[in-house]
Image (spheres, rainbow, N blue to C red):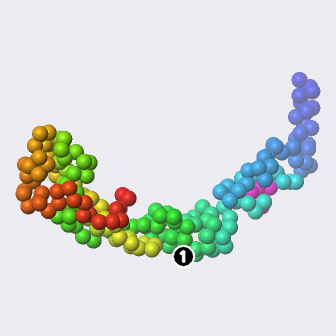
Amino acid sequence: MRSKFVTGLGIAVLLCLGVSLPAVAQPACEGVCNPLMDCRMPCYDGGYITCGEYQSCNADLDGDGVLWWNDNCPQHYNPAQADCDGDNIGDTCDSKNEKWVLVSTDYDLCYIDVDDHLLFQTLEAYGKQTYTNVCGSGGTCIRHYFLGGGDCPRPLSSAYCCDQAFPEEVCDMFLKKDLCGTPKCDF
Ligand SMILES: [Ca+2]
Ligand SMILES: [Ca+2]
Ligand SMILES: [Ca+2]
């Protein structure tokens, strides 16, 4: 009882004299600090500091005035932060800078059986849609769109099957012809 009292009294005296107790061990700065780290992260580098003092946290590595966390191209100088397609990757570093806008729809220029099932079971008719890219290098692509389909008895001719599922003029226009055009859209 007496020894505990003496120990407590000793710590109280040290604190009153402004003597610091040993700090809790911190990880080495070089081990924990990087451009993605919170600048308040405490670490050890010859003294107890933070990643901010170590100058390796949430940095503006490309010097465009936007810190790493907020920079949509953290390793490319792009102070305007332009992002045409709105995917939070800046135009300067966006490998797929695409925003496709539908510009026209046609009815009569596509495959009627894109899956090649015409002689077996299924008819599928497709029209085409033309898209243009309003971002980056621009460009145009063509996309199929589904018009309709129907089942076809196996022994009947493909032309007959088509006429059963669609108006004759539709079959005449695009039976087994892929006139959708290229390049095909990859979406
Ligand atoms: Ca930056
Ligand atoms: Ca940047
Ligand atoms: Ca983008």
Residue 118 location (% of width, % of height)? 19, 47
Tell me residue 150's x, y (percent): 14, 46
Residue type of the residue flagged with mark 1? Ala
The answer to whether residue 16 is visible is no
Magenta segment's dominant SS is helix
- Seen at 76% across and 50% down, the residue is 31
Left or right relative to 163: residue 48? right
Q: Quadrant of residue 62?
A: bottom right
Asked whether the viewer can see residue 83, the reply is yes
Q: Secondary structure at mark 1?
A: loop
Q: Is residue 50 magenta?
A: yes
The residue segment tinted magenta is 49-53
Residue 30 position within the rendered picture, expressed as x and y whole percent measured from the top left:
78, 53
Q: Residue at x 82, y 43 (%)?
A: 25
Q: Is residue 88 above or below residue 123?
A: below
- Count of numbered circles on the image: 1
Please say if 4 is above or below 105. above
Q: Quadrant of the N terminus?
A: top right
Please state which of residues 61 and 144 is positioned toward the viewer in this rendering: 144
Quadrant of picture, ligand 2: bottom right
Does residue 66 appear left or right of residue 134 in this picture?
right
Residue assigned mark 1: 80
Looking at the picture, how far across and down is residue 126, in whole percent? 21, 57
Crowdedness of circle 1 by 10 Å Cα count: few (<14), some, many (20+)?
A: few
